[in-house]
């Protein structure tokens, strides 16, 4: 076991659901209820963290009332990732507004924090410790460079903090200060962190106005959708996780947060999974044209044209390969063993091609697919022609097998692309889909009349609900109903859905939590079956699985009512948005059968 970096005595880990997200598309921070920023990577998503107390390293930026007798609350400003922490004290109320400044600078993270003594005078403590390399690098030692400005630099990392007149710097580089605010007063703190020397600072007021304009422009009106506030927050999360320069969306903002305490199931999701980005692009397209769909189409097109049938499931946001996994010398978030990098970056996952084709088809349906996108669709079809019989890792990134979901995803992608891109050889694409479906039926149809998990594995798998709820799947297919019933019977508990039975588990929940993506897949399956009440029940139950900030992780511990896994998980927010958008459209169109409008004239044989 490697030696561990000493933990900060100032930080006590909180349940994952207590943390709020600040993000600007280039990187993200996690903020605890005590005003402690305990996670931030600079300059980009998968660069080493400079604040890593979340996973047992060093480095944080805390701003909170001095009074320990307090109740901490908070909320996002609607349609943004601007978080206001709210503390009720014995003799007053203090708030702190927090954001990463936007539009983002790829080299500089700017943390905006605005204190407000709402009721009564407020005494506030400030603690700042910047430690690169997940806390392993020598500390930055701030020194005063102006009346209220502190700066430091070391090893390619530059720091500037504005807003503190008096502060103390310890030998370990930790800067501490005490602020006293009279009732009604506001006070700005601005922290800049960069991989290059810092230029002229932006005044706090201008930075806040720019950030507010950014979020106002980025998030569409969602008042016609159910769960309007949650949908707008889902848009904000997806926007915050999407790199504004490349269009690539990371799967989550963090690494090494445990899916199950002590199980070694903790991974690094700070990379762009093409499947996840397709889910997000399709979800947004279901609501209407939006830059997030265009970004997803652009990323998928570029990667398919560059790599063809050697397509990787995940990339860094700049298109480089995902680094191999390695373990950090940290104690980790309780119950986890820290690792960075991800071995999935070297896998072959057939379903990714199907999801990309569905995404390109959605862009074609909205007349937003250019010539490169059409070329990417032809390349993806060629890759499926050559590889659809290969064992592969599938959606859940498991040892190679003949996974049913992957083949059905390919069928849906081919049918959607033939229908909506309308290539000259559309009939050949449909014929390929029919061949794949026929062979999948031969190998993977369960004797009971449902789909089974894989050739040779008769168990159900909630992933199968995704292609069966596609607009290309025939309405009234009895295998959809039979598969959905098997999932509901064998893979659900207390209104939540698990993805499959673990090989080493005796009951659901022993090896991992309920999979929130699968709860929204169940919603979609019930909706297209024409069971709106059941769909609403699954939707509402699944969207309840959050902490106070309303963020979804990958999994949910049903018995302990706790989030599990990395935070926030992009594809869960995407599926909430998609279900809300499709439900609203079907209600408007009066489509009692639940079939999507784009599918009405295109009902292929099962």
Image (cartoon, rainbow, N blue to C red):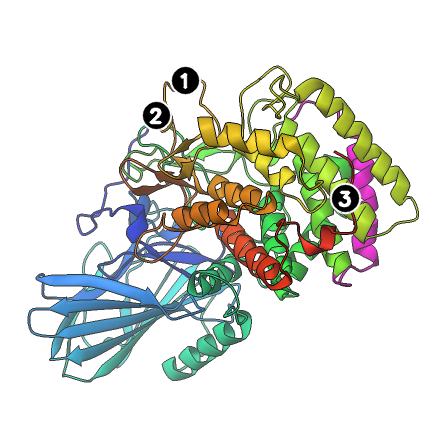
Q: Nearer the viewer, residue 456 or 384?
A: 456
Give yes or no for residue 377 being in the magenta stretch. Answer: yes
Mark 1 or mark 2, earlier in chain = 1
- Label 1 sits on a secondary structure element that is loop
Q: Quadrant of the N terminus?
A: top left
Give the answer, above or below, for where 259 lies relative to 71.
above
User: In x, y percent, where is residue 348?
Assistant: 66, 31
Mark 1 or mark 3, earlier in chain = 1
Mark 3 or mark 2, earlier in chain = 2
- Label 3 sits on a secondary structure element that is loop
User: Marks 3 and 2, how far apart in space?
Assistant: 41 Å
* Residue numbers of the magenta segment: 366-392
For residue 603, the mark is 3
User: In x, y percent, where is residue 89?
Assistant: 11, 68
User: Marks 1 and 2, how far apart in space?
Assistant: 9 Å
Which residue lies at the image location 48% right of the left edge and 71% below the top edge? Answer: 102
Q: Is residue 605 left or right of residue 45?
A: right
Q: Main secondary structure of the magenta part?
A: helix
Decide: marks 1, 3 in contact (CB < 8 A)?
A: no
């Amino acid at each position: 076991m490697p030696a561990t970096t000493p933990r900060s005595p100032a930080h006590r880990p909180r349940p994952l659901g207590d943390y709020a997200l600040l993000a600007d598309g280039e990187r993200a921070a996690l903020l605890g209820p005590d005003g402690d920023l305990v996670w931030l990577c600079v300059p980009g998503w998968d660069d080493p963290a400079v604040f890593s107390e979340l996973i047992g390293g060093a480095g944080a930026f805390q701003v909170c009332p001095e009074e320990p007798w307090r109740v901490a609350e908070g909320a996002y400003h609607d349609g943004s990732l601007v978080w206001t922490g709210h503390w009720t004290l014995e003799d007053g109320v203090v708030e702190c507004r927090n954001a990463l400044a936007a539009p983002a600078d790829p080299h500089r993270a700017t943390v905006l924090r605005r204190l407000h003594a709402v009721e009564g005078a407020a005494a506030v403590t400030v603690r700042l410790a910047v430690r690169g390399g997940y806390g392993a690098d020598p500390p930055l030692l701030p020194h005063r460079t102006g009346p209220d400005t502190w700066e430091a630099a070391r090893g390619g990392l530059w720091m500037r903090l504005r807003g503190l007149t008096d502060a103390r710097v310890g030998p370990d580089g930790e800067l501490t200060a005490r602020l006293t605010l009279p009732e009604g007063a506001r006070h700005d703190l601005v922290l800049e962190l960069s991989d290059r020397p810092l230029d002229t600072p932006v005044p706090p007021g201008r930075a806040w106005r720019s950030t507010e304009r950014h979020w106002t422009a980025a998030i569409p009106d969602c008042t016609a959708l159910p769960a309007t506030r949650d949908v707008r927050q889902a848009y904000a999360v997806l926007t915050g996780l999407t790199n504004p320069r490349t269009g690539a969306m990371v799967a989550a903002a963090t690494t090494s947060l445990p899916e199950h305490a002590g199980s070694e199931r903790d991974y690094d999701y700070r990379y762009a999974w093409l499947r996840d980005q397709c889910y997000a692009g399709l979800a947004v397209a279901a609501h209407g044209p939006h830059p997030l769909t265009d970004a997803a189409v652009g990323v998928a097109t570029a990667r398919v044209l560059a790599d063809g049938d050697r397509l990787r499931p995940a990339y860094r946001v700049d298109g480089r390969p995902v680094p191999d996994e390695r373990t950090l010398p940290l104690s980790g978030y309780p119950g986890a063993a820290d690792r960075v990098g991800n071995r999935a970056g070297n896998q072959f996952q057939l379903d990714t091609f199907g999801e990309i084709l569905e995404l390109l088809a959605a862009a074609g349906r909205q007349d937003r697919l250019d010539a490169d996108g059409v070329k990417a669709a032809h390349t993806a079809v060629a890759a499926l022609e050559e590889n659809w019989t290969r064992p592969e890792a599938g959606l859940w990134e498991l040892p190679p097998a003949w996974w049913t979901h992957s083949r059905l995803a390919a069928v849906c992608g081919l049918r959607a692309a033939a229908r909506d891109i309308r290539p000259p050889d559309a009939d050949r694409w449909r014929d390929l889909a029919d061949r794949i479906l026929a062979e999948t039926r031969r190998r993977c149809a369960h004797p009971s009349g449902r789909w089974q998990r894989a050739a040779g594995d008769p168990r159900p798998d909630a992933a199968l609900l995704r292609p069966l709820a596609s607009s290309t799947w025939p309405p009234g297919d009895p295998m959809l109903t039979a598969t959905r019933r098997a999932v509901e019977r064998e893979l659900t508990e207390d209104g939540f859905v698990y993805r499959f039975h673990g090989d080493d588990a005796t009951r659901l929940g022993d090896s991992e939590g309920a999979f929130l993506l699968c709860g929204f897949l169940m919603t979609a399956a019930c909706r297209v079956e024409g069971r709106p009440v059941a769909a609403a029940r699954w939707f509402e139950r699944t969207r309840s699985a959050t902490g106070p900030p309303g963020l979804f992780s990958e999994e949910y511990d049903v018995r302990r009512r706790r989030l599990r896994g990395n935070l926030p998980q992009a594809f869960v927010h995407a599926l909430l948005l998609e279900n809300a958008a499709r439900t609203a459209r079907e209600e408007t169109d009066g489509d009692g059968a639940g079939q999507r409008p784009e599918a009405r004239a295109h009902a292929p044989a099962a």
